[in-house]
Image (spheres, rainbow, N blue to C red):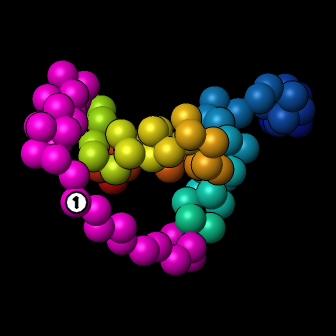
């Protein structure tokens, strides 16, 4: 009976998605090794207030994600995992 049960259980896929989880962990590992720099720019206060208002209306956004999305629209190479607010993932 035990051998039959083992053979049946081996043919059933896992209930957890281990493959996608492993890829996600690898991606976060590589992104932590990448060096980061801070950009400082002087912008009009009205623009800063518009960005704050946009962030208030869209809770999943931060100043960083708003700016990165704008840079992506201009044609810069921005990976999609950079466009996610990582505060909710911790």
Quarter of the view holding residue 72: top right
Residue 81 position in % (x across, y down): 54, 46
Label 1 neighbour load within 10 Å: few <14, some 14-19, many 20+: few
Q: Look at the numbered disc 1 and give the secondary structure of its residue.
A: loop
User: Is 26 one of the magenta-colored residues?
Assistant: no
Of residue 68 and residue 45, the one placed in the foreground of this image is 45
Quarter of the view holding residue 61: top left
Looking at the image, residue 63 sits to the left or right of residue 49; the answer is: right
- Residue ID for mark 1: 42
Of residue 19 and residue 51, the one placed in the foreground of this image is 51
Examine the rendered structure and indicate whether residue 19 appears above or below residue 55: below
Looking at the image, residue 2 sits to the left or right of residue 54; the answer is: right
Of residue 15 and residue 86, the one placed in the foreground of this image is 86
Examine the rendered structure and indicate whether residue 59 appears above or below residue 80: above
Residue drawn at x 55%, y 35% as measured from the top left: 73
Residue 64 position in % (x across, y down): 34, 50
Residue 71 position in % (x across, y down): 50, 45
User: Is 44 one of the magenta-colored residues?
Assistant: yes
Quarter of the view holding residue 4: top right
């Amino acid at each position: 009976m035990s051998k039959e049960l083992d053979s049946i259980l081996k043919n059933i896929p896992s209930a957890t998605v281990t493959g996608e989880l492993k890829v996600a962990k690898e991606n976060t590992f590589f992104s932590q090794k990448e060096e980061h720099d801070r950009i400082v720019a002087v912008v009009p206060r009205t623009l800063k207030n518009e960005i704050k208002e946009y962030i208030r209306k869209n809770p999943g956004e931060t100043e960083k994600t708003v700016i990165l999305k704008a840079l992506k629209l201009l044609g810069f190479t921005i990976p999609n995992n950079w466009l996610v607010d990582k505060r909710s993932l911790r």
